[in-house]
Amino acid sequence: MVSVLLLNVSHQAWATHLLGGEIVAESVTCHSHTYKIKIILYQDSGSDVEFGNGELSFGHGALIHVDPHTDFTLTFIEKDSLYKVVHYEIEHTFPGPGAYLISFREFNRNADIANIRNSVNTPFYTETQLVVDPLIGCNNTPVLQEDSLTFVAYAHSLYIQPLQAVDPDGDSLSFAFVTPKQDIDIAVERYYTPEKFDIRFIENATASDGVSLPTFSANQQQLVWDAPNVGGDFTYALQITEWRQIEGQWTKIGYMTRDMSILVLDTIHHTQAIDYITAIEEKEDDHSFLLSPNPTEGLLTLTIQEDFWQGGTVSVYNILGQLIAKGNLVYRIIHFDLSDQSEGIYLLHIRHGLHQKTLRVIKR
């Protein structure tokens, strides 16, 4: 059986096909604990790796092996030359009211994902928390747009991914990026959100305007990356939380997570993010600098604790990416005065050659 082989052979053989996925749950009737559970997976059209070989957990009991030969309704949707969609759907009755963590895991993620270290040996994982409780009424998970997915972005250009998130029950939705996982309560290693990867590795990383720092954001209608700075494969995990007003209080009643890839093409410079990772070895410690006080009411002191950074530069930006101050790292101790700036978050972007570090400051 393949499920046994997965435990005894290199996981690398099962990689290089998944672009992303999510789990949705639809109530069969509002007065029962029975749901249609649908695993939605997106596959590279150029891959010959068979779908399946994954594990589904309903949040109670044993794992179910997911393949075309088990009790799933399987639907393939051919989209275009870039990707295709597969739906694994199964009906399931939960044992009673409760919060159930429904999860899907498959070996493995694609190779050479820029913002996940050793991605080819890291399982793909996505999860949805479903609250089953007849006392609060019907509860279905949010549904995301499938028909207009855009997996390809271009370096130095604005990238927009339509989401068009809809909650069938009319619940309020909030959006947050989270660290992708490789199993329940186990995050992938050494992860940066796409825009933080740019700030960390790319010299003079900017948004599409050529001035502001890159941003990565999402709301009910769309996900926006402004803008990729280098070519390569990037992954993000977007968690969408449902909120319902119960007895006058906004109450969290579950969430769903879309774990997805973006392929960035650099058609001008032909750079690849993996080249930057190789050229710039990351430091394991976070003791290069001392920043105090943080939060600050205005006066701020940056202390360099490693000789390596002397001779570099430091730039201070507000949260909109506007340059507030800039200086050279000539001395070990550098003072800043943010007294005339408004309250909020500021970024200290430190650069020495190809090496970069960004520190966050809170102004009160």
Image: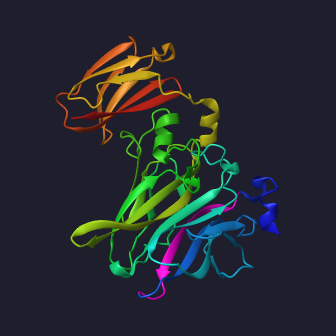
Position of residue 125 relative to residue 155, above or below, is below
Q: Is residue 194 left or right of residue 69?
A: left
Task: Tell me residue 205's x, y (percent).
Answer: 45, 37
Between 60 and 209, the one lying in front of the other is: 60
Which residue is rendered at x = 33% and y = 16% of the image?
Answer: 334
Q: Is residue 362 left or right of residue 265?
A: left
Between 50 and 57, the one lying in front of the other is: 57
Indicate the quadrant containing the C terminus: top left, top right, bottom left or bottom right.
top left
Position of residue 279 relative to residue 98, above or below, is above
Between 254 and 217, the one lying in front of the other is: 254
In this view, which residue lies farthest toward the left? 340
Indicate the quadrant containing the N terminus: top left, top right, bottom left or bottom right.
bottom right
Model colouring:
rainbow
Extent of the magenta region: 16-30
Position of residue 291 relative to residue 33, above or below, is above
Q: Is residue 128 magenta?
A: no
Q: Is residue 28 magenta?
A: yes
In this view, which residue lies farthest toward the top? 331
Q: Quadrant of residue 273?
A: top right
Which residue is rendered at x = 49% and y = 40% of the image?
Answer: 198
Which residue is rendered at x = 28% and y = 25% of the image?
Answer: 293
Between 196 and 157, the one lying in front of the other is: 196
Q: Quadrant of residue 361?
A: top left
Magenta span main SS: strand
In this view, which residue lies farthest toward the front? 96
